[in-house]
Image (cartoon, coloured by chain):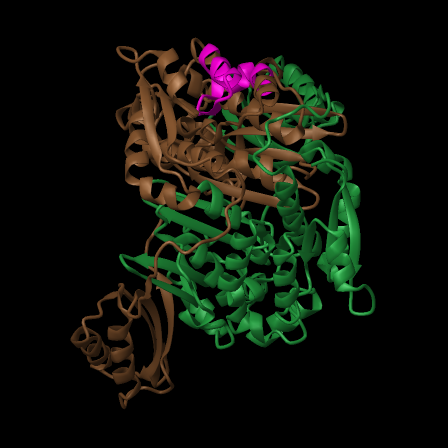
Chain colours: A brown, B green
Amino acid sequence: VSGPVRIGLLGRGTVGGAFLDLVGERADAIEAATGRRPEISGVLRRSEGEFEEILAASEIVVELMGGTDPAREYVLRAVREGKHVVSANKQLIAQHGDELFGAAREAGVQLRFEAAVAGVIPVIRVIQESLAATEVSKVFGIVNGTTNFILTEMAKTGASYSDALARAQELGYAEADPSDDVGGADAAAKMAILARLAFHTPVRLDDVAFEGIENVRPDDLAYAKEFGLSLKLLGVAERHTDAISVRVFPCFLYRGHPLAPVEGPFNAVIVEAPSITEITMSGPGAGGTETASAVLGDVVSIVAGKAPVHAVREQLEVFEDVGSAFYLHLEVADRPGVLAQIAAVLGDNRVSVKSVVQWGLGDDARLVMVMHESPESRFYAALDEIAKLEVLRSPPRAIRVIEEEFV
Amino acid sequence: VSGPVRIGLLGRGTVGGAFLDLVGERADAIEAATGRRPEISGVLRRSEGEFEEILAASEIVVELMGGTDPAREYVLRAVREGKHVVSANKQLIAQHGDELFGAAREAGVQLRFEAAVAGVIPVIRVIQESLAATEVSKVFGIVNGTTNFILTEMAKTGASYSDALARAQELGYAEADPSDDVGGADAAAKMAILARLAFHTPVRLDDVAFEGIENVRPDDLAYAKEFGLSLKLLGVAERHTDAISVRVFPCFLYRGHPLAPVEGPFNAVIVEAPSITEITMSGPGAGGTETASAVLGDVVSIVAGKAPVHAVREQLEVFEDVGSAFYLHLEVADRPGVLAQIAAVLGDNRVSVKSVVQWGLGDDARLVMVMHESPESRFYAALDEIAKLEVLRSPPRAIRVIEEEFV
């Protein structure tokens, strides 16, 4: 197959718009990756476009309408016409998976839906491809960004559930009617999909027991701190010999649990199996561009057909003078003016100091400083000068620091 | 294509042995996933097997020999004979990537090497497939488990570098000659591979500036704690407009950085791009079974050919009485014997208490307890009884807790 690959888009909301932008921006890269240039064959929106026309003109159909009606009918039609389909629609896959997968297998087409679960996190691909022959024992994680934002807000500010929800709505992390998110139904649909793929068994929405976060009180978060616990809405799918359980519930995690630091609208999923121990993946759980990016990954994989062999797309230079922040450890004579002298050397080289701690050691002092980022050449020039200062008691010790602070 | 898929194995060390075991154990699953049953066509080890014979008998060659000689020659021969190749050999890919990828493209075969970088973490697949058309701006992380184990040990116990190294050797996390790991060369080879794939540009080992951890002193770790910093050996590959930098260096991270909690022999990789924000992935960085599992994922993808459509492999029941630990929040009358009364109800239902905190509130008391895991039916039975106790001042509040504690 050659020539452009014609993509029909059903639905043009936030994700649809971001997808059209991305296809435009990344057309060269898509052509480099697959040998074929993407072309939008038509866009179906409420007010314009004709499904049958778009279907006939497309090789791949991208369904971003949401809901199951008419999405189910359109996807079935597309599959039966031999078109590959990419969907971001969790309700569609969770409720009509059996029918859709059956139709895709029969037609010999691909049906991909990475964007339906956990946003930009490639959990569908990892379970279906990397772990296709792996005996997964458990898949669990934070698969709803709205509730994770609300719980993070409550924990950090002591806000009530309703105030935190209002804040989430203000920032676009929660919808005007948030009930599917806060009640756990959204996470339940995603867990039904993950359980199905991980355990190769049919899972209906009814099989998923779910609770939401509407009844969480700031008190509970406060008391739980006594035990070092933080609260998350978890989805947990587990295999118990010849049975599975799939559940969604608010849950306390001990400090140090890999999901405990996942905050705000981020999602994270952990897959466990005896042969892999565990894989943890995290990233933004939503966002138009992020979701569109997951959709595009699926489209590119369909066009590429099989795993790509690396090919050079451009020749990039190696950059020498990278910017870095540094930790600097100095043992110096403890006398007036030493810190000023060292600070002057750093200042002359335009390296700025972020924090300093000094310990006295009898006649000597130990000075530990953290710098702000600067080109490494400047820091090393300063370090050379400092090393020559007569007040130094031993060679200076420098180690890089990632400057970003996370709260 | 049908009939069994014939796999030739080159090298039978720890990973090779684990791979043979996994292929045997998962043969049914591989057949379910791909339609073809795996069959080992031959194993080449120092003392037995003839490469040419194994090559002729195989459809896929799995190279687990390590080193570049004769691995390079064998892989080239296999590719040129039209065989797909899976390799776990980071030096081979880092040093001879251009030649090998060129040969694979020419022959139209797959060359996969997930296990060469970051153990069980599917970072190669995610970069090459999910992000094939994504403009990656940065890939960084902890890609050497030996050094991460040593740094974790130093930070936790105050051990010197050499004592921590000895401990790593004792536990099998470091080799007798650890210089490639502790000096940063191993991480450099992995970062050369990641940078090449992420930026679609040739990267030679010489392009990677690296430092190791041999000179890290326990002092530095201790002082850095004043700033809330923890030390990791990081690999960082960044794009700067038309140039890249690829470096390996020990680096302090602030508390809250997504890589800060990655401890012991675990690896973690973060991929950043404007359209995805970031994806973080972590998991065991080594281990025979884990590495073999990554190799098997590549083999299965080759046999499957294109992305699988979900198919039911078995019908699993939904399990009802899952085990859970709970947090329990009670407001009770503050009088003697109340705690004993509640503890008795829990005990009668065989629910055991892990920790309790009690706050006085004038005539009332607030009791917050965390249970050990038990079947939920038992806990709920106890909860029903507790709710009926005359000493209760308001309905009890229960939230699940993941019991595992991480250190």
Residue at the spot x=42%, y=9% of the render?
A70
**A340 or B271: nearer the eye?**
B271
Quarter of the picture containing the N terminus of chain B is top right
Question: Where in the figure is residue A189, as x and y percent of width and height?
Answer: 52, 20
- Measured as percent of width and height from the top left, residue A119 is found at 43, 32
Instruction: Determine the image quadrant of residue B78.
Output: bottom right
Main SS of the magenta segment? helix
At 44% from the left edge and 73% from the top edge, which residue is drawn? B206
A245 horizontally vs B141: left or right: right
Residue closest to the far right = B48
Image point (65%, 26%), residue name: B337
In the rendered image, residue B377 lying in the magenta stretch gets the answer: no
Q: Position of residue A81 (x, y in %)?
A: 50, 17
Relative height, residue A153 to residue B18 (above, below): above
Observer able to see residue B64: yes
Residue A258 lies, in percent from the top left, at 53, 44
Q: Is residue A103 above or below residue A143?
A: above
The answer to whether A50 is drawn above or below residue B166 in the figure is: above
Whether residue B228 can be seen here: no
Magenta segment: A73-101
Left or right of A224: which side holds B21?
A: right
Reply yes or no: does residue A99 show up in magenta: yes
Above or below: residue B344 compared with residue B252: above
